[in-house]
Image (cartoon, rainbow, N blue to C red):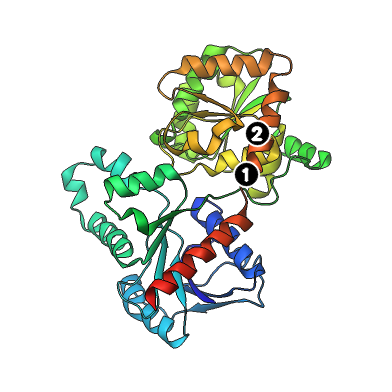
Amino acid sequence: MKVGINARILNTPSTRGWSRYAVNLLKELSGMGVELVLYSDRPLHPFHIDQLDNRFCRVIVSPPIRYLLWEQLWLPRRLCIDHIDVFHSPFNFGLPLKATCPLVLTLHDAIDQVFYAPQVPLLQKIRPRSLTSWLHLWTARTAASRIITVSEHARQDLIEHLHLPADKISVIYEAADPRFVPDLNHDECERVRAKYGLPERYIFYLGGWEVRKNVSLLLRAFAAADLANVSLLLAGGRAHEIEQFSRTAEELRIRDKTLLLGLVDDADLPALYKNALCFVYPSQYEGFGLQLCEAMATGCPVFASCSTALTEILAEGGERFNPNDPAPLANLLGRIACEAGYRDRLALRARARGQKFSWRRAALQTLEVYRAALAEHQ
């Protein structure tokens, strides 16, 4: 099978959610001998491309062109010229309205419609940039022969809020990168500990710091737990967010026990999880929650809010808490810090659940979606 991929998000070394999904899926597909053709309107970064099997993968970059023309004119012509069997965009949009082959879209969630849209003023919704974004998303959903999403919760949101046909949507779970393992080298753990000046015992959070991620609840819960010789480590924030949460920590009188790292090197993440007492994910809305898989793969105990897809992904792999009340999380933090054996039991649960997620399984299921789309198209 010859599969075209909209790979334009791989033009930087960034390894956030969509790019992690794309790279891990492509690595598995190229390793299975699927012929991949990666299309972009700008050069792709070697950090990503070097991870793929170049015997089964080639990159085609267009001449400089406006994005809309690239997506709707240049791209469908290339798909025809290259005799592509199936074309897949792995990041919510990026499909031409018409093409000679079936089109597959990975639609990770319906967060814009479910979580953000009710909060956006009407005047902001009708700004040219907002309308353009809506048009790209609508085009991709309309053009897609088949849609992949990453959890049953996300699937229900797509059906209920975007009114997509249920029989068009397949659920395929993501997974942690293969480098997230429970038996991480001791020297690597110590290297990362020294690099960031990590304390011996800390609670860990990694992710965005926007309001939806609910980091302020974690700060309040940590303050309420009042743990001796335990710090709170927050990673992922940007400069203005670090300043904001530094003020919050001061107000809660936990600034001396709070480490605000901001963005951290991707290579250091396995050890940051492994060294932690536990990983906490208090988000109010997630289509999947990849950090849960990463933490569980390293055997790090996990506490996650009982909201949206997080309950589904965590399942028996950790403990859940109310994302609107800091008290239940404060109790869990007290147990992990003080109760002998509790962390060990949670670590075993995390490892067992983490083994349920696999990029190879995800790639095999994605191939089935490609075959179904191709069969329907013929």
Q: Quadrant of residue 73?
A: bottom left
Residue at mark 2: 350
Q: Nearer the viewer, residue 110 or 237?
A: 110
- Looking at the image, residue 339 lies above or below residue 321: above
Q: Considering the image in quadrants, where does the N terminus appear?
A: bottom right
Q: Amino acid at mark 2?
A: Ala
Judge the density around disc 1: few (<14), some (14-19), many (≥20) Cα neighbours within 10 Å. Answer: few
Query: Which residue is located at x 68 percent, y 49 percent?
Result: 267
Indicate the amino acid at tag 1: Lys
Residue 356 shows which numbered tag?
Answer: 1
**Callout 2 secondary element:** helix
Could you say where residue 324 lies in the image, as x and y percent from the top left?
A: 40, 22
Q: Secondary structure at mark 1?
A: loop
Distance in Å between CA atoms under marks 1 and 2 = 10 Å
Dot 2, how many residues are within 10 Å of its Cα: few (below 14), some (14-19), or many (20+)? many
Q: Nearer the viewer, mark 1 or mark 2?
A: 1
In percent of width and height, residue 224 lies at 52, 12
**Residue 193 in the image, given as x and y percentages of width and height:** 74, 35
Direction from residue 28 to residue 39 in the image, left or right: left
Is residue 161 depicted above or below 136 in this figure? above
Specify which label sits upstream in the sequence, 1 or 2.
2
Q: Quadrant of the C terminus?
A: bottom left
Going 40% across and 55% down the picture, which residue do you hit? Answer: 107
Is 270 placed above or below 216 here? Answer: below
Quarter assignment of residue 154: top left
Residue at figure coordinates x 21%, y 47% from the top left: 124
Q: Does any portion of residue 326 appear in the rendered image?
A: yes
Q: Quadrant of residue 290?
A: top right
Do the numbered discs 1 and 2 sit on residues whose CB atoms are within 8 Å?
A: no
Query: What residue is shown at x 68% (from left), y 37% (from top)?
Result: 352
